[in-house]
Structure formats: C-alpha cells, structure tokens
Amino acid sequence: MSSTSNAPTGNNRVRIVVATSVMLTFISYWRAAAVILNDLGSSAFYAGGIAEQAIGKSAPWFVLGVMLFAFAVRAVYVESCSMFVRGGVYRVVKEALGGTLAKLSVSALMFDYILTGPVSGVSAGQYIAGLINDTIAIADAHGWIPSAVHRLFHGTPQVGVNGTAVVFAIAVTVYFWWENIKGIEESSEKALWVMQITTVMVVMLIGWSLFTLFKVGGHLPPFPTLANIHYSDESLGFLKHSKLPHMFGVLGLIIGFGHSVLAMSGEESLAQVYRELAHPKLKNLKRTAIVIGVYSFVFTGLVSLLAVMLIPDDVRVKVYSDNLIAGLAMYMAGPQVVRLAFRAFVVVVGFLILSGAVNTAIVGSNGVLNRVSEDGVLADWFRRPHKRFGTTYRIINLIVGLQLFTIIVSWGNIYTLGEAYAFGVVWSFVFKTISMLVLRYRYKGVRNWKVPPNLHLFGVEIPIGLASVGMVLLSTAIVNLFTKSVATVSGIIFSVVFFAIFSFSEKVNRRKHADKAMQMKEQFSLQQAESVERETVGIRAGNVLVPVRDYNTLNHLKWVLERTDTKEQDVVVMSARISQFGTAAYGLSTEQVFSDYEQTLFTRAVSVAEGFGKKISLLVVPARDPWSAIAQTAHNLESSAVVAGVSSKMTTAEQAFNLGSAWEAIPEPKRQFLLQIVQPNAAVDTFRIGPHSPTMKNEDVVMLHRLWLKITQEPGLENVHHHDILTEALTRFEKAYSERDREEIVNELRQNANSGPLPIRRIADQVPTVQPDAARPDREEAPRDGNPPIPSTTNN
Amino acid sequence: MSLSVLFVKILEVMFVAGWIGSAIVLVLTGVEDVGTLLDRKDENSH
C-alpha cells in the first residue's frame, strides 16, 4: 500500500477523496431536445383549451405569441448556462440575489414542478374519458348499445369525465411514485422514442388539418383586440368587478398573455440537461434550444390555431376544451371510423407524453429538493436513503403526497390546475431573468454568450434584450397576481409554506452541521478533487474497486479483504453519490457530496477493514448513474477488478450488462477489467467487462482445427497458426458484413441468437472457467485454497 | 389619474417596451440560429 493511502493518518483521521464533479454520460442535442420536449410538448394537450376558456376565441394568437416569446426566454437560459455549467434557477438566483430569494424562487419552481404532475395526469385522463364517451355515443347512434343498457343508464351510457380523470391521474401518479421509490433511471432513449411517435402524430395532425381546411374551408380566429377578448367569470380573478380590464387594450393583451403563459412550461429543463450535453456544449445547447423552440411553436401554437379553425364553436369549448387535440381529430375530413381511429392514436400519444410528464414532475421535484437539501436548506432526515432501493424516499413521498392532494382537491378541473400551474411557471422565469440582469453587473467570471442587443454608454453596458424579456415576464406575472385568484392564493400559500420549511430547516441544519463538522474533523479528513485520478487517490494500477451503497451489506468488501494482500494490491472502497436528473445542474461542495449517510457508510467500511487489519482507500463520487460512475472510476483508477454486491433490483447478469453498457460509453482508449459479484452465500459470478476472447464452443474449436489441418497441407502454408485462420476469417466476415451480405448474415445470426444464450451477454460475457453448478454454468464458487481470485492485471 | 390607473399604465409600458425589445432579441438570435444550424461542424446526432 502506498504511503498516501486513505488509511488512518498519524492523528487517527481517515483521508477520503471526494470528487466534486458529477460523472455523467453525455447526450446529443437531439436527445436533450427530446427530454425537454417530453415536458414542454405535453402542454400542447391542454394549454390551448385552458386559454380559450379564459379569454375566448382569440386565444390561439396568445398561445402563438407565448411560443414566439419562448424563443427569447430560451436566450436567457443559454446565457445562464454559458456562465454556470449548472445554471438552474436556484444557482442563478442564489448567486445574484442571495439565499433568501433563492429559497423563494425555488419554492415557486417547486409549485411549478409539483403541479406538472396533476395537470398532466388529469389531462391524460380527460383524453381517455373523452374517447370512451364519444366511442359509446357513436356506437349508440348506430344502435349497437342494447336497450337494456340504455335503460339502465337512462340514456347513452357515459363515464364521468372529471371522476375518470382523477382516478387515472391518481393511478399514474402512484405508479410513478413506486417506480421512483425503486429508483428508475431516466433514459433519453425513452424520451426520444416518445418524441418520435409524437412527431408522427403531429405531422399527421397538421397535414390532415391543412387538407381539411383546403377541402371545407375555415376562418382564422378573431385577432386579439380588446373587443375580441371575452373574459370568463374566473379569468379576471380579483379584477372581476373592476372596470380596468375593459378600459385598457394593452392590459387585455397582458391578461390574455398571462392566461396562455403555461404553454411554455418546461423551459427550465434546458438548464438541467445542459450539464449532460455532449461537446461542443454551448453550440449544442443552442441547437437544442432551436429544436425545442421550433417544435413547440409548431405543435402547441399551430395546433391551438387549427383547433379553433376546424372545431365548430358550439362544441369546441363545451365538449373539447379539455381535450382539444382529440376534438381536432374528430373534425377532420374523412370517414368517421378513420377519424375515431386517429383520435385513439392521439389519446395513446397523449397518454405516453403526459404520463412521461407526471414522471418528470416527480423526478424534477426530487432533484430540486435533493439539491436544496444538499445545501442544508432541507433537513437531512428527508434525504435518508430507502433501506432497499437507496432512493430519497421521504422526499418522493412528500412530493407525491402533495400531488395526490392537488388531484383530489381539484377533482379533475384542468382549468383550475392550469391556472395555478402558470403561477409557478411565470414566477420562476421572473426570478431567473431578474437575477441574470443583476449578474450582468455583479458577475465577473467567464460568460461565453449574452442575450443581444447590448448597448454601451460611457463604458456601461445596457442589456436591452435581457431587460426587455424581464419586463414582459414581470408585467405578466404582476397582472396574473390579480387575475388568477386561485393561482395567487394557492401559489402564495404553497411558496410561503415551502419557504418557511426551508428557512427553519436551514437554521436547524446550521447548528447540526456545526456539530457534525466537529465530529468529521475528529474522524475523517476530506480531500476535494475535481476529478477521480489514480494519483489523487494515491493507489497503484491493477487495484480492486469495491462499490458500496448500503452499510448493512458489506459482505463483498469482507470477501475482497479476506482474499487480497493489500501490500500487493490496493483496495478502493467507492460510494457513488447519486444525483437525480436535474441535480447535476447544480454545483456540489465537498460537504454536500459527503453527507451524514456517507459518513456512516465509511465508518462501517473502515471498521470492516480494521477487523482484517488491512488498509483501504476511500472515495466518494457524485454521479447521475451508478454504472457510469463505477465504469469511469474503474477506468480512471486503472482497476483490474470491480467487486460488487448483489443488487436487490436486478440479476447479476443484468448488473454486468449495465456496467458493460456504461463501459461502452467511455471514449477510447480504455481498459478492460473483471467484474465479480459476490452473493450473500459467498458464491461469485465473474464477468469480463470490455472486449475479450470469446468463449468458443467445442465444435467451433474442432472446425478451426480441421481447417488448420487442411490449410497447412497447402504448399507454403506449413507455418500458419490457428489464430492466422481466425484473423483471415474475421477479416472476410467484416468485409462481407459491411458490403453485400449484411442482411443474410443478420438473419442467420438472428436465428442463432433465438436458440442461443441471452442477448444480455453481448457486452459482458460471463467467464465459464469453473462450472460447479450445471444450472448456472457461469457460477464460480469462492475458492477455498486461500488464493486471491482477483488477478492483479487483466489481459484479455 | 388614480393610482390604479397609473399602475396599469406602468405595466402596459413595461409590456409593450418589453415586447419591442424581445422582438429585436428574436430577430438577432434568429439570425445567429440560422448560422448555428448551417454550421455542421462538430455535429453529433446520435
């Protein structure tokens, strides 16, 4: 063991290397756009209907205006990300306006995030209930409903739309609650797939609508003038009995704009995905912003416009205001059965994207609360990991509890939910933009891009563009305070309660952390490192990496220590501090990464090592995905083996597959290593991660040998080796695969794969060196001869 | 002019001036966006 190990130092303190950069897998701008559009695009399903209920038939112009203005808001986010890699609302407001306003802004953001779930779930439920009712009504019109059923329901059987929506929203929320408790991983792959299906629907919807307009004609909605804005009873809120809204034309425009502003909810995700964007980051962020801007303008803006042009006035608000796109599908030119089928497709897409938004709401809220909790603003109690799944279940329970409460209280009223939702959306934008304005004068660091135009007068920069965006947002937010009474009351109550919780927790934590810091000083010495390097950790190449998560299951660490001579081979115990989606958008300090939990975990690990009288090195790595963290750390530390415990959520083969996939994502050049998964009964499953010699079937070996015998008979080929034949065969195979015979080869492989082993073994092939168990040919019993099973170097 | 009317007037001026400025932002960033879209260098579309 090198002298710089993380064993107890002279004063009995254990050195722990804490990496402060989150280990991420980077994604392309298309995937980033898909992730954002899963949230931003979902508002197309309800924003138009809510706006029309509030301000009348000219609403689509306001929705289009909001979508246009969203391009300018995006520019604010691009500037903030060009300053801070983690440029979310909390970070930016804290930097500019201090902790108090940051807490207030994050409370508004939480209101936005928490309401995303109910509004999306209820909207999806409304689409489903609407489809059921219309299908029954059509069946009834054709006389397909038996008269007995008719009599039973006193007419055409119908489901209660709001009740069904509530039941559906509760079911979806509970489903994603459980998924989040288990710790599902957010996948950009899934987001991309949902957006591909949505794009098919959008193209069909717009194409068919234009064809219908060409065939049957249509009129543009009335332009947004004071005369054309028809306020509903609820849309004026506290100004219901005031003459003001009817006196000023521009005020009417602000009210209309304020009722449509929820169409751009989801923009905050732009700052959250930035951290994970591939190089060149800023350029890719701009590309992402263009993609989401154009897409949401076409989808949300154009679809709202077409709906007013095609759906007759007498049914649009009365029947379809809560499921506008479904109504649009029903008023296309074509046979009724085809329209109904398309509507069903709309409902399926709506279900996918809106359910995804329910999940995004839980994941996003969890990410934000985790972040503020790491900053000491929320009590550590909330962050205690789930015993089995390791997730921050208390935070998830709190979020889902609030969402279920909101769903039940609103009883499926999408209008009320949408109105309240707009409060969080607009105020988080206001805080963000004002902070960016302040930072124009206070921030002295690198800033790669600025919102144009900027005027320079007497050496002072005047940020005209940024100030303009801020003025639109602030005036809209202030007017919304007066016109959206439900949103104002509920938003203020929510924000004040959250603000109080944050402030109280912060005070308690400050005292507690002072004690903790004292304890920590006595026990551990934290060494901060931007990235994980072998030299920083102070270990030699060929070490063994031991990921740990639960301090109650450290059997695999004991297994390693039993078999490893730490004088010859270093053992590194690593804890991946998982940051949820969105948390990566914020900076982490050493104390945030090394929390109470890590302290307990490492105290146990050190105690185990002391039991064996052996030294271990300790490392904490923040990460979005545990597999990437392990693969990247093993790669950086030049580990020869990773020894892990059994997961409660997946089989050992799945664990190996996940690690193998993460290894594949590491850029070349990279090292292979061995993965050993220790079962509770000390049996071990061993896998090689990375390319390695495949396990050959006996008949293949015989075939190779037969070929070798024949070939060496040829004149001049007497010295050919078996591997020469394999090289020639593989070179020819590669050529055939990349040229003419690809399809044939793929079909044959597919047939073989269907009768062969699990595809999971593609990346992480198991090593069948010892086969004690016929049912599990890959199972290797822990050797009992005392020899370490972990090679100090791996040479595949 | 009552206080509420003055307040509304201020909000209206903010909104209109803000929209004019935002329109300039849209035009300027739009021109830059076209350049970003045409620049295929470093593009990674996986």
Image (cartoon, rainbow, N blue to C red):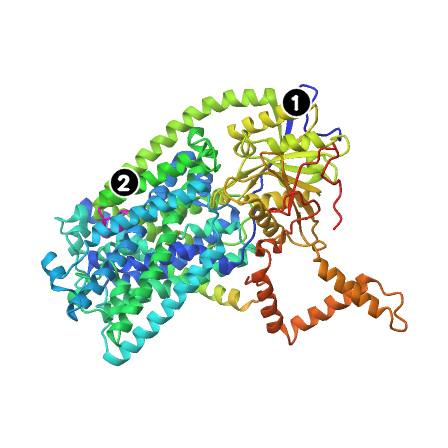
Residue shown at the point (9%, 59%) measured from the top left: A151
Q: Quadrant of residue A668?
A: bottom right
Q: Position of residue A277 (x, y in %)?
A: 53, 54
In the rendered view of the protein, which quadrant contains the N terminus of chain A? Answer: top right
Q: Which residues are magenta?
A: A411-420
Q: Of residues A32 and A578, which is closer to you in this image?
A: A578
Tell me the mark number nearer the camera, choosing from 1 and 2: 1
Query: Crowding at label 1, few (<14), some or many (≥20) Cα neighbours within 10 Å?
Result: few
Q: Which mark is residue A611?
A: 1
Q: Which mark is residue A738?
A: none
Q: Which residue is mark 2?
A: A405
From the viewer's perspective, tell me whether residue A520 is left or right of residue A341.
Answer: right
Question: Is residue A748 among what the camera can see?
Answer: yes
From the viewer's perspective, tell me whether residue A319 is left or right of residue A339.
Answer: left
Q: Earlier in the sequence, mark 1 or mark 2?
A: 2
Say above or below: A170 vs A35: above
Chain of the residue under the numbered disc 1 shown in the image: A
**Main SS category, magenta section:** helix
What SS does tag 1 mark? helix
Question: Is residue A476 among what the camera can see?
Answer: no
From the viewer's perspective, tell me whether residue A184 is left or right of residue A7.
Answer: left
